[in-house]
Amino acid sequence: MTTEIYLDGNATSAVLPAAIDAALDTMGRRFGNPSSTHGAGLKAKAILDEARACAVRLLGVGEGRLMFNSGATEGIQTSVLSALIGLRERQDKGEAIGDLLVYGATEHKAVPESLAHWNRLLGLNLTLHKLPVDGDGAHDLAALRQLAGQAALVCTMAANNETGVVTDLDGIAAVLGDTGSRAYWMVDCVQALGKLELQLASTRIDYAPFSGHKLYAPKGIGMLYVRAGAPFTPLIMGGGQESAQRSGTENMAGIAALGAVLAALERGDTFRSEGELCGFRARLADSLRAALPGVVFNHPFDKSLPTTLNFSVPGLSSRELVDVFDAAQVRVSAGSACSSAKAAPSYVLDAMGLPLWRSAGAIRMSFGPLADEATIAAACARIERCGAALRASCLIPSERTAVPHDGLVQLGVEGACSWMVLDAASRSCIVIDPLPDVTARIESYVRCQNYQVLAIVSTLPNAGRTMLIDALGRHFDRHAQADEYGWPAGGTTVTLENGASVGAIRIGTQVLANMACGAGDELRAYLLGAADGERLPAASVRFAFSARPARQALGAVGAEQTLLCPTRDEHNQFCTSLTTQAAATPSAELQLDGAGLDAFLQAHPDAVLIDVREPYEFAATITPGPAGRVAQSVPLNRLAEYAAEWLRGEPAPLVFFCRSGNRSVKAAQCLRRLGHPQAYSLTGGLALAPLPLAA
Ligand code: PLP
C-alpha cells in the first residue's frame, strides 16, 4: 500500500466530498452573486442563508451575530478590534475598564499578535498579560481569579491545536462571574468545531472565531460568532455584505462547502462518535509505545480531544521523527517550529513546564472525526515500520546488534564535525574530534553495532574526551595511556611521502597516521589509507582529517584524490581536495527536473540514483512507483566516503535525491566542487517526483 496517510488534521484537513460537490456547484451552476436581485443571485443567496441558518442552529447562536469571513485569523482580528473599541468607548465615558489584556499562555500566535497590534494602533496602552497553564495545559484559574478585576479582555482557546487539551470553559466563566469581572471574553473555537458541543448564546462568551479548513471545508472560509450586545466593529468596510458586518463579495464556494460540513454535523450521520475516536487514539498510542521505546505523551488523554496525540521520544529529534514518518508516507508535524538544524522548542509545551527535550522533540499526530478503521490500521502498521527503521539505524535501542558499517561517518553540530572511522570486519572504530553534542549519537552507534573504540583523538590538544569515555563504558579501554591529543601510546609507525616517520594505528586493512600540521603548530592532522608495508605514500592516503585547508594539510603527504575531511563544515562542503574548485556550480546546472528524469536515465544508462536521506528514511520508505531503478542509500554523513569512489576512473552520472531537494543539492554541489562533471540534484525531491526505489 503506497497511499499517503494524512495525520496532520490540526494543521488542515482534507475536504469532505460533499463539501467539494457543494463548492463545485456554486462555481459551476449556481455562480451568482448573493447580493444580486435576479434569479442567479437569489439562488446563491439561498445557499448563503441555508449555511448560516445551519451554523446558527448548530452553534446555538441565539440572538447573536454569525458572519462568514476568511478564517479564524480574521475572526480573531475582528473580535480584538471590536472589544478594544468597546473598551475605549467605555473608557471615554469615564468607566474603569481594567488595564490587562489577558490571554492563555498556549493560545495560537494569532491571539497575542492581534492583541499587541490593535492595542498599539488604537493607542490604548493596555498591558498584555499571559495567563499561565499547569503541567496538563489547563489554565491557572486561581491566577485568573486574581487578575479578573483588572482584566479588560480575556482570550482563551476552547481546545489547543498542538496538544488537543480542552479548556475548562465553565471554570473560566465561573471565575469571571464570581469576581464580577466586566472583561470581554474571546474563545478561539477553531479546534473545537465538530469535536465539542457548543451552545454559544447560553454562555458568557462574547466572541468565538471558527475556521473551515480545520474541519473538512476548504481554506479561506471561516465564521465569527459575536454575542448579542457585545461591542462590534467591522474590520472590513465596503459594499455592506454580511449585513455590513464584513464587506466584500462572499466566498460562495467556501460558504457552500462549509455549509455542507455543518449540515453533516447537524445530521450526525457522517462523523465518528467520540467513543470511536478515543478507540482510534488508543490504537495509535499503543502502536507508538510498541514501536518507539520510552515514548511519552505530552498531554493527559482524558483532558484532551481524542483526535490529537502529542509525543516525544528520548534520543530522537522532531526532525528525525517527521522525516521517518514522511518516508513511510505518514504525514505528521513537528509539535514545534522546526528550523533546518535544530528544532525550536514548542511554546505550548514550554508553557506546560515540560523539559526541553520534550518540547523541542515533540511530534503532533492528529486526525479528524472522519477517520476510518482502515486508515488507523494502516497507520499502526506504518508506525511499526518506522520503529523498525529507527532500530536498524541505531537511533533507538534494539535487542539485536545492528549490521555494522564500514567506512567513514561525519557527525556535525552547528558547523563543527566529529568523524568516525569504522571497520566492520574487526568491529573496531576510531573517533576523531568528539563533540560533546554528539556523545549520545556516538555512544548509541558504538553500542548498537558493538564496536570496540581503538582511539578517541583530537586535532587540538586537551580537547576533552572524558564525557565520551564515560559514555562508552566497556567499548573503550579507559586505562590505556594516551597523549594530550588522545593518541594512544605504543602503536606502530609509518613513513609518509615527505619522509617523516609518524605514529600510526592499524584499523582493519588501513592505518590512521598522526602528524603535526605545519612546523611548530600545535594542531594535528590524521591521515587514513592502506599502508604499503612501513610506508604510507601520498597516493595511498584516502582521507585526511584536519582543521587546515587541503593545500596546507596535504601539500607534501597527500595526492589529488585524497579527500580532506574538515573539523568545521559551516557551509556543508562535506570534504575538499587539492583540486577543489572554489566557485560553486550555478544551481540551474545541477537541477534535474522530475519530468525530465526518465529521459535523462534513458540517455545515461550508467547513471546512478542516490538517495541521500538518512538510512532510517530509506528503510521506512514505501515504494512509491513501479520498481525498476535501484537507488543507492548514501546519507549525507557518509558522502565523503562515497565521493572518493565516485570520483575514481571515468565517473558515471550521479543523480542525488532526497525528500525535498535540499539535501541532494548539497551533495551534488559537493561532487561538482570535487571535480565530478555530472552530479545532479532532483528538483523538489521525492515529494514532487516519486521515484522507483528498491528497498
Ligand atoms: N487558532 C487556532 C487554535 C488554530 O489552530 C489556527 C490554525 O492554525 C488558527 C487560530 C488560525 O486559523 P486560520 O488558519 O483559519 O486563520
Image (cartoon, rainbow, N blue to C red):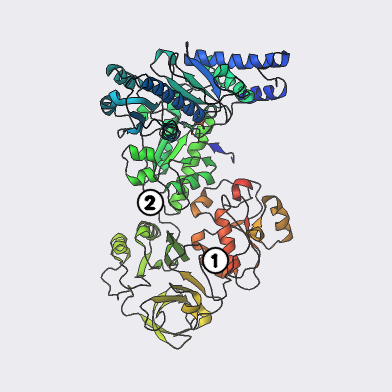
Check the image and report above or below for 65 versus 214: above
Residue 195 visible in the displayed image: no
Whether residue 365 can be seen here: yes
Q: Write down the quadrant of residue 646 in the picture.
A: bottom right
Question: Label 1 neighbourhood size at 10 Å, few (<14), some (14-19), many (20+)?
Answer: some
Instruction: Write down the residue under mark 1.
Output: 642
Q: Amino acid at mark 1?
A: Tyr
Query: x, y (%) of residue 93?
Result: 37, 18
- Residue 255 x/y as whole percent: 60, 22
Can you say whether 610 is above or below 8 in the image? Answer: below
Which disc is residue 411 wearing? none
The answer to whether 123 is drawn above or below residue 350 in the figure is above
Circle 1 SS class: helix
Q: Quickly name the residue at label 2.
A: 399
* Marks 2 & 1, CB-CB < 8 Å contact: no
Quadrant where the image shows the N terminus? top right
Question: Is 542 left or right of 306, judged from the image as shown?
Answer: right
